[in-house]
Image (tube, rainbow, N blue to C red):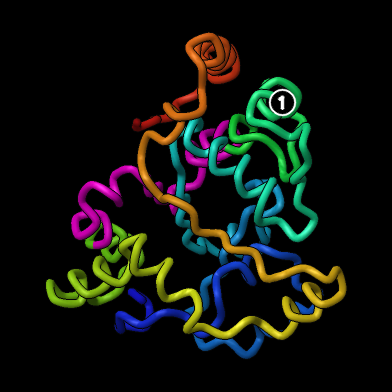
Amino acid sequence: MLLTGEAKYIKYEMSGDLMVIPDLNVLDHQASPRFLSLHLPYKWFPKSHIKQGGKIVHVTRNPKDTYVSYYHHAVEALPYGLKTDSMTWNHFFEHCLMTKNLLFGSWFDYEKEMSLAKKTNKNIYTVHYELLKKDPEKEIDGLSKFLGVCSNEQLVKDIANKCQFKNVKSNIHNRDVHPEVSKMIEGIQRKLPNIYRKGIIGDWKNHFTVAQNELFEEMYEKEMDGYDVNVIY
């Protein structure tokens, strides 16, 4: 929206950007400046983009809410979902979260890699999900300055309104499904996953037991020791 200067949703539903698209030629037809939504670790970012000083917007969320979201996404939303009687939150916490045995990698490894990258790459801008929820207009204005795009107070307000979680969630049915995603969904005979659940801050408190929280805090201290990572709850 900041790049186009219009508070309008993208054509395709967001879940299409979270799946593997076999034909990357579609990127050649995007108008410049282009943006690409990735879940890849920094080491797999396009080397030419980094070398040429391309800008990177690093969106992060506190690890506890991230893992709760991951759990529900893995169980319910992924086309190869893990929804079974045994895949409870407790099972996920013990056998996936604490062992870092996770599809797409762990929050810890991703954030540590980004922390190191920011020491040498000054074109990385971090956006905290929690701050976006609390003061969206301030965060959007800061992002526009980083991107070097023109914005005004009304545009920022309009974008903030469009990006409210409830509005994004309710608009999901008004957007098209990417053709490649349609093929993939049809091939595995599943419905298009709904990637939007609650979008709140602190839902981890409804999942973590006291004992689990203590174990996680110990793991966090061990994993993140020596890394400059700011976590907001």
Which sits in the foreground, 191 or 140? Answer: 191
* Residue 196 seen in this snapshot: yes
Would residue 84 appear left or right of 200 to someone viewing this image?
A: right
Which sits in the foreground, 200 or 103? Answer: 200
Q: Is residue 217 shown above or below 132?
A: above
Q: Position of residue 32 (x, y in %)?
A: 50, 84
Q: Is residue 79 shown above or below 115?
A: below
The span picked out in magenta is: 111-140
Which sits in the foreground, 113 or 194? Answer: 194
Q: Is residue 183 shown above or below 19?
A: below
Q: Give the crowd class for mark 1: few <14, some 14-19, many >=20 residues within 10 Å.
A: few
Which sits in the foreground, 211 or 20? Answer: 211
Q: Is residue 212 shown above or below 156?
A: above
Residue pictured at 51% horizontal, 83% vertical: 175
Residue pictured at 34% horizontal, 31% vertical: 233
Mark 1 highlights which residue? 91
Residue at the farthest right position: 187
Q: Position of residue 186 (x, y in %)?
A: 81, 77
- Residue 110 picture quarter: top right
Residue pictured at 77% horizontal, 30% vertical: 101
Residue pictured at 66% horizontal, 46% vertical: 41
Residue 105 magenta-highlighted: no
* Residue 226 seen in this snapshot: no
Q: Position of residue 183 (x, y in %)?
A: 80, 80
